[in-house]
Amino acid sequence: MELDVVGLSRLQFAMTALYHFLFVPLTLGLSILLAIMETVYVMTGRPIWKQMTQFWGVLFGINFALGVSTGLVMEFQFGMNWSYYSHYVGDIFGAPLAIEGLMAFFLEATFVGLFFFGWERLSRRAHCIVTWLTALGTNFSALWILIANGWMQNPVGARLNPQTMRMEVSDFAEVLFNPVAQAKFVHTVSAGYVVAALFVLGVSAWYLLKGRHLELAKRSMTVAASFGLASSLSVVVLGDESGYLSSEHQKMKLAAIEAMWHTEPAPAPFTAFGLPDQDARETHYAIQIPWVMGLIGTRSLTGQIPGILDLVQLAERRIREGQAAYDTLQQIRALPPGSAVPAALSQAFDRQSPSLGYALLLKRYVDDPRQATDEQVKKAAWDTVPQVAPLYWSFRVMVGLGLFFIVLTATFFVLSARRRLDAHPWLLKVAVGSIPLPWIAAECGWIVAELGRQPWAVEGVLPTAVAVSHLGIETVLFTLLGFVAIYTVLIVVEMKLMLAAIRKGPRELPAPTPAHDVPLVGKVRAV
């Protein structure tokens, strides 16, 4: 990544997004776990389940507050650092964000307050409904954000207005039910559930090792192991769906993840290990498993997955087609204001416009893409190849950790069924040590999703280099360092608050009233 305005703006958004996503998955998962625990409390009336809900609710509240504060800054960056992006696609991208703010955020924020302050003011059932609505609001918030992000990965239901130079919604239902967005939502939410499950599992294991709050810890581990196993398995299934959709909509991303330089005969092998060399355009010491990538990417024995070199040639053809589209666009924009666009010109633009974004890749080298040389066209075609090594290793770290989570949660699920959760202290230590691993897997997932989309801000429509604001390098660098410093302080604050709450433990249950102190009416009712 070059340290120019584009590179620094990318780095700033990446840093704020990665910091923000340290808080989001735990919020998503804990909200559901709280709802499950309180439901058990309402059904059984046992105070231990209320104690569990309140204790994990404190940790949820700390995390929720810091997640909101870090997320707001990201939305401001669209206007600060990505002003042309906001102008070009704001009509589509802004709609899900507005709905998220008006519906999910207010729903979530309102019921979070009722969750914390309504314990003594609401009935058991009413408070349980509040907890479920809090969880629903939290997950709805993620839904609308990921619809917006999914559109960036697979821009559907929109077309460019050549006179205003803005993308406009042509079919909002297509934007809403974008298959990439739906797959991304369920995959991301499931990953958040895994984060929360292993967090609860690890903290509870620590209590067992310390011999503290044993009843709460064992019940929490049982819930977390069951919930975590189901979530870990769903992440694998939904990740497979995301890979399949990438083979349809983001072929270059899939080829880069696999460091697949040449198109392999179908079904393509999966490279379990290798050292990608982007300069040499090959992968050294590759260890391949036959057929696996073809089956994952195409779900067939005959479908081919194109390699990077073939996709670069395709990009070069699209760039040349885009130059014709850019020429037609300039003819339309040269018409007198208010005049009708000739039918022939409009039809030509409709036919050529799918490749217009590829012509904009040339803006990095020349002001007018029509004046680009063959050498500049070839360079722009190679710009469509993302950084292969980070994608390759991030994907494998994510997958490896995902398989480990399945084994870990399945082990504790079996132990909980046999009521032997504290039988193996070394396993409890493994659970404690595994607490940070789901966050690493989640961050790797976002690296794969976002780095794999480069050089596009919107896949095939708007290059990142064109979407950036015209700011000075010093301005972007100053704000980047400021955000990193502030977010680092926030993370330190959260960790201190979380650790203090964990060390303190849950509020002790009230001691049962001795039988001789129970009033006569109470004795009659007890009988």
Image (spheres, rainbow, N blue to C red):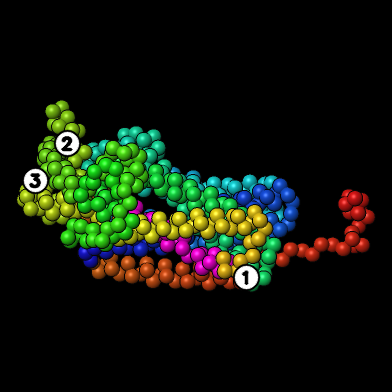
Tell me, yes or no, whether the two marked residues, 2 and 3, touch with CB atoms within 8 Å: no
Element type where label 2 sits in the image: helix
Q: Image check: 181 left or right of 288?
A: right
Query: Crowdedness of circle 3 by 10 Å Cα count: few (<14), some, many (20+)?
Result: some
Q: Quadrant of residue 95?
A: top left
Give the mark, 2 or 1, whose residue is nearer the N terminus: 1
Q: Main secondary structure of the magenta part?
A: helix
In the figure, is residue 381 to the left or right of 424?
left
Q: Which residue is mark 1?
A: 209
Mark pair 2, 3: CA separation: 14 Å
- N-terminal of the pair, mark 3 or mark 1, is 1
Q: What is the x, y in percent for residue 196?
A: 53, 57
Give the residue type at disc 1: Leu
User: For residue 96: magenta?
Assistant: no
Where disc 1 sits, the SS reads: helix
Quarter-of-image position of residue 169:
top left
Q: Is residue 447 visible?
A: no
Name the residue that disc number 3 marks: 370
Image: magenta residue range: 428-450
The part of the image, by quadrant, that contains residue 480 is bottom left
Type of amino acid at the residue the image marks with label 2: Gln
Q: Nearer the viewer, mark 2 or mark 1?
A: 1
* Residue 208, x across and y down, in percent: 64, 67
Q: Check disc 2 and report the residue beneath it.
A: 352
Q: Which structural element holds mark 3?
A: helix
Would residue 163 appear left or right of 43 to someone viewing this image? left
Question: In the depicted view, which residue is nearer to us: 102 or 17?
Answer: 17
Q: Residue at x 46, y 68 (%)?
A: 491
